[in-house]
Amino acid sequence: MKNLLQKLFLLAAATAALTSAVAHEKKIPGPNGGRLLTSVSPRVEFLVTADRKVQLTFVDDAGHPIVPAGQSVTVISGSRSAPTTLTFSRQGDVLISNAPLPEGRIVPTIVQLKPAPGAPDVVERFNVNLATCSECRHAEYACICGH
Protein backbone atom coordinates (compact mmCIF):
# COMPACT_ATOMS: atom_id res chain seq x y z
CA MET A 1 0.00 0.00 0.00
CA LYS A 2 2.83 2.38 0.89
CA ASN A 3 4.52 1.66 -2.48
CA LEU A 4 1.26 2.42 -4.33
CA LEU A 5 0.86 5.74 -2.49
CA GLN A 6 4.43 6.71 -3.35
CA LYS A 7 3.82 5.95 -7.04
CA LEU A 8 0.59 7.96 -7.03
CA PHE A 9 2.33 10.88 -5.33
CA LEU A 10 5.17 10.83 -7.90
CA LEU A 11 2.65 10.63 -10.75
CA ALA A 12 0.71 13.60 -9.35
CA ALA A 13 3.91 15.63 -8.91
CA ALA A 14 5.06 14.86 -12.46
CA THR A 15 1.65 15.81 -13.86
CA ALA A 16 1.66 19.10 -11.94
CA ALA A 17 5.18 19.94 -13.14
CA LEU A 18 4.30 19.16 -16.77
CA THR A 19 1.06 21.17 -16.59
CA SER A 20 2.93 24.12 -15.09
CA ALA A 21 5.61 24.01 -17.80
CA VAL A 22 3.00 23.94 -20.57
CA ALA A 23 0.94 26.75 -19.00
CA HIS A 24 3.95 29.07 -18.85
CA GLU A 25 5.25 28.37 -22.35
CA LYS A 26 5.92 31.58 -24.28
CA LYS A 27 3.81 32.11 -27.36
CA ILE A 28 5.10 33.33 -30.71
CA PRO A 29 4.02 36.90 -31.52
CA GLY A 30 2.47 37.84 -34.84
CA PRO A 31 4.35 40.30 -37.08
CA ASN A 32 1.99 43.16 -36.15
CA GLY A 33 1.57 42.33 -32.45
CA GLY A 34 -1.56 40.21 -32.82
CA ARG A 35 -2.41 36.64 -31.84
CA LEU A 36 -0.79 33.98 -34.01
CA LEU A 37 -3.16 31.12 -34.88
CA THR A 38 -0.92 28.10 -35.41
CA SER A 39 -3.52 25.38 -35.93
CA VAL A 40 -3.75 26.21 -39.64
CA SER A 41 -1.17 26.33 -42.41
CA PRO A 42 -0.19 28.94 -43.35
CA ARG A 43 -0.38 30.50 -39.89
CA VAL A 44 -2.67 33.48 -39.40
CA GLU A 45 -2.21 36.56 -37.26
CA PHE A 46 -5.46 37.82 -35.67
CA LEU A 47 -5.18 41.54 -34.89
CA VAL A 48 -7.81 44.01 -33.68
CA THR A 49 -7.17 47.41 -35.25
CA ALA A 50 -7.72 50.82 -33.63
CA ASP A 51 -11.23 50.98 -35.15
CA ARG A 52 -12.03 47.48 -33.71
CA LYS A 53 -11.94 45.78 -37.10
CA VAL A 54 -10.19 42.43 -37.38
CA GLN A 55 -7.10 42.25 -39.58
CA LEU A 56 -5.89 38.80 -40.64
CA THR A 57 -2.33 38.45 -41.92
CA PHE A 58 -1.16 35.11 -43.28
CA VAL A 59 2.47 34.33 -42.42
CA ASP A 60 5.03 31.76 -43.51
CA ASP A 61 7.00 29.50 -41.15
CA ALA A 62 9.55 32.27 -40.58
CA GLY A 63 6.79 34.70 -39.51
CA HIS A 64 6.93 36.86 -42.64
CA PRO A 65 3.64 38.08 -44.14
CA ILE A 66 2.47 36.35 -47.31
CA VAL A 67 -0.34 37.18 -49.73
CA PRO A 68 -3.63 35.35 -48.99
CA ALA A 69 -4.40 32.84 -51.73
CA GLY A 70 -7.85 31.26 -51.73
CA GLN A 71 -8.39 31.11 -47.97
CA SER A 72 -11.81 32.00 -46.63
CA VAL A 73 -12.51 33.21 -43.10
CA THR A 74 -15.57 33.93 -41.01
CA VAL A 75 -15.49 35.33 -37.48
CA ILE A 76 -18.46 35.10 -35.13
CA SER A 77 -18.19 37.20 -32.00
CA GLY A 78 -20.22 38.75 -29.23
CA SER A 79 -22.99 37.36 -27.08
CA ARG A 80 -24.71 34.12 -27.98
CA SER A 81 -28.10 35.83 -28.01
CA ALA A 82 -26.98 38.43 -30.58
CA PRO A 83 -23.79 37.28 -32.32
CA THR A 84 -22.02 39.39 -34.92
CA THR A 85 -20.74 37.64 -38.03
CA LEU A 86 -17.73 39.26 -39.67
CA THR A 87 -16.78 38.57 -43.25
CA PHE A 88 -13.53 39.69 -44.83
CA SER A 89 -12.24 41.39 -47.93
CA ARG A 90 -8.70 41.64 -49.16
CA GLN A 91 -6.91 44.97 -48.73
CA GLY A 92 -3.36 44.73 -50.00
CA ASP A 93 -1.71 41.70 -48.40
CA VAL A 94 -4.20 41.31 -45.51
CA LEU A 95 -7.86 40.51 -44.95
CA ILE A 96 -9.94 43.17 -43.14
CA SER A 97 -13.35 42.55 -41.56
CA ASN A 98 -16.41 44.23 -43.03
CA ALA A 99 -17.49 45.51 -39.59
CA PRO A 100 -15.98 46.09 -36.15
CA LEU A 101 -16.06 43.65 -33.24
CA PRO A 102 -19.05 44.09 -30.92
CA GLU A 103 -18.64 46.48 -28.00
CA GLY A 104 -16.97 45.31 -24.82
CA ARG A 105 -13.52 44.76 -23.41
CA ILE A 106 -13.82 40.95 -23.52
CA VAL A 107 -15.52 39.56 -26.62
CA PRO A 108 -16.08 35.80 -27.09
CA THR A 109 -14.88 34.92 -30.59
CA ILE A 110 -14.95 31.97 -32.99
CA VAL A 111 -12.64 32.06 -36.02
CA GLN A 112 -13.57 29.65 -38.81
CA LEU A 113 -10.87 29.24 -41.46
CA LYS A 114 -10.93 27.29 -44.70
CA PRO A 115 -7.23 27.12 -45.66
CA ALA A 116 -7.93 25.98 -49.23
CA PRO A 117 -10.90 24.93 -51.36
CA GLY A 118 -11.90 21.40 -50.41
CA ALA A 119 -9.85 21.43 -47.19
CA PRO A 120 -11.60 20.91 -43.86
CA ASP A 121 -12.44 23.96 -41.76
CA VAL A 122 -10.19 24.89 -38.85
CA VAL A 123 -12.00 26.44 -35.88
CA GLU A 124 -10.37 28.53 -33.12
CA ARG A 125 -12.33 29.72 -30.07
CA PHE A 126 -11.01 32.34 -27.66
CA ASN A 127 -11.94 35.53 -25.84
CA VAL A 128 -10.67 38.73 -27.40
CA ASN A 129 -9.57 40.49 -24.23
CA LEU A 130 -8.56 44.04 -25.20
CA ALA A 131 -6.90 44.87 -21.86
CA THR A 132 -3.14 45.46 -22.06
CA CYS A 133 -0.81 42.88 -20.51
CA SER A 134 1.39 44.52 -17.88
CA GLU A 135 4.39 42.33 -18.80
CA CYS A 136 4.63 42.14 -22.60
CA ARG A 137 2.47 45.22 -23.36
CA HIS A 138 0.42 43.32 -25.99
CA ALA A 139 -3.35 43.14 -25.74
CA GLU A 140 -4.29 40.18 -23.50
CA TYR A 141 -5.77 38.25 -26.44
CA ALA A 142 -2.31 38.38 -28.07
CA CYS A 143 -0.22 38.09 -24.87
CA ILE A 144 3.07 36.23 -25.38
CA CYS A 145 4.05 35.92 -21.70
CA GLY A 146 2.34 32.58 -21.16
CA HIS A 147 0.82 33.55 -17.80
Image: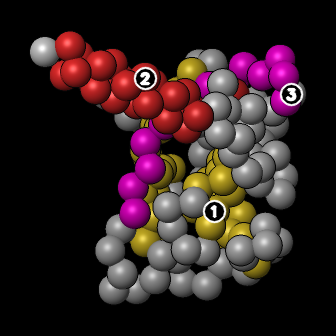
Q: Is residue 123 magenta?
A: yes
The answer to whether residue 29 is left or right of residue 72 is right
Is residue 37 visible to the viewer in this orientation of the structure?
Answer: yes
In the rendered image, residue 80, in percent from the top left (x then y), is placed at 31, 28
Residue receiving disc 2: 13
Q: Where is residue 126 shown, x and y percent of the image?
A: 48, 37
Residue nearest the viewer, comparing 5 with 61: 5
Q: Position of residue 61 (x, y in %)?
A: 71, 74
Q: Are marks 1 and 2 in contact (CB under 8 Å)?
A: no
In the image, which is nearer the foreground, mark 2 or mark 3?
2
What residue is rendered at 43% in x and 42% in y? 125
Name the residue carrying label 1. 44
Element type where label 3 sits in the image:
loop
- In this rendering, position of residue 26 left or right of residue 64: left
Q: Which residues are magenta?
A: 122-136
Residue 130 in the image: above or below residue 2: below
In the rendering, which numbered label is found on residue 137? 3
Sequence-first tag of 2 and 3: 2
Taking the magenta stretch, the answer to whether it contains residue 12 is: no
